[in-house]
Amino acid sequence: MSLAQYADDGIFAPRRIAETLRTTNDEIARTTGLGRDAIQRKDRIRSDKTQRRLREMVEIINKVEPRVGSALMAYAWYRSEPLSGFSGQTAMQLVRMGRADDVLDYIDAVDAGIHA
C-alpha cells in the first residue's frame, strides 16, 4: 500500500490510517505508544514524535503486507505476532518502546532467510 494513502498533505494522518486499517484513532494511538492528544490535536499530530511513530508503524505494516496478503493482516501481525529473539514481544510492543528499527531489521533478516 502506498504511503500516500496514509497521509494528508504530506503528513501522516491518524484518521486515514485508522480508516485504512478499519480501526479507531484511539487504537492507532495505543498501538504506536502515543497519547490521545497526540492524534487529536492538530499541533500534536504534526510533532516530530507523533509523525515518527506513525511512520514507523506504517513502514512495518507496508513491509509485512506482501508476506501476509493485506494491510489488515499485516496490522494483525504487528499487534499480535511474538517475534523470536525479542522475548516474545510483538512489533507493536517494540515500536511503543522506541525500537522500530529493530523490528525493521528483524523483518529484513527473515526476508533474507536469516532467522533472528
Image: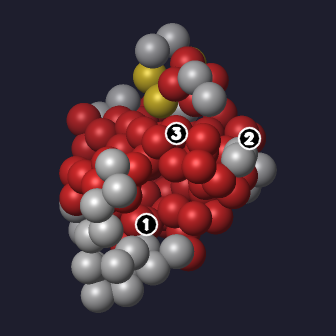
Spatial CA distance of label 1 from label 3 is 14 Å
Label 2 residue SS: helix
Residue type at tag 1: Met
Neighbours of disc 3 within 10 Å: few (<14), some (14-19), many (20+) = some
Residue on which disc 3 sits: 62
Residue 23 vs residue 58: left or right? right
Labels 2 & 3 near each other (Cβ < 8 A)? no
Is 26 located above or below residue 7 in the figure?
below
Residue on which disc 2 sits: 19
Classify residue 32 by image quadrant: bottom left
Labels 1 & 3 near each other (Cβ < 8 A)? no
Spatial CA distance of label 2 from label 1 is 19 Å
Residue 5: give x, y in percent of width and height.
62, 23
> Does any portion of residue 41 appear in the rendered image?
no
Residue 73: give x, y in percent of width and height.
69, 57
Of pointers 1 and 3, the one earlier in the residue sequence = 3
Label 3 residue SS: helix
Which of the labelled discs sits on residue 56, or is there none? none
Q: Nearer the viewer, mark 2 or mark 1?
A: 1
Label 1 residue SS: helix
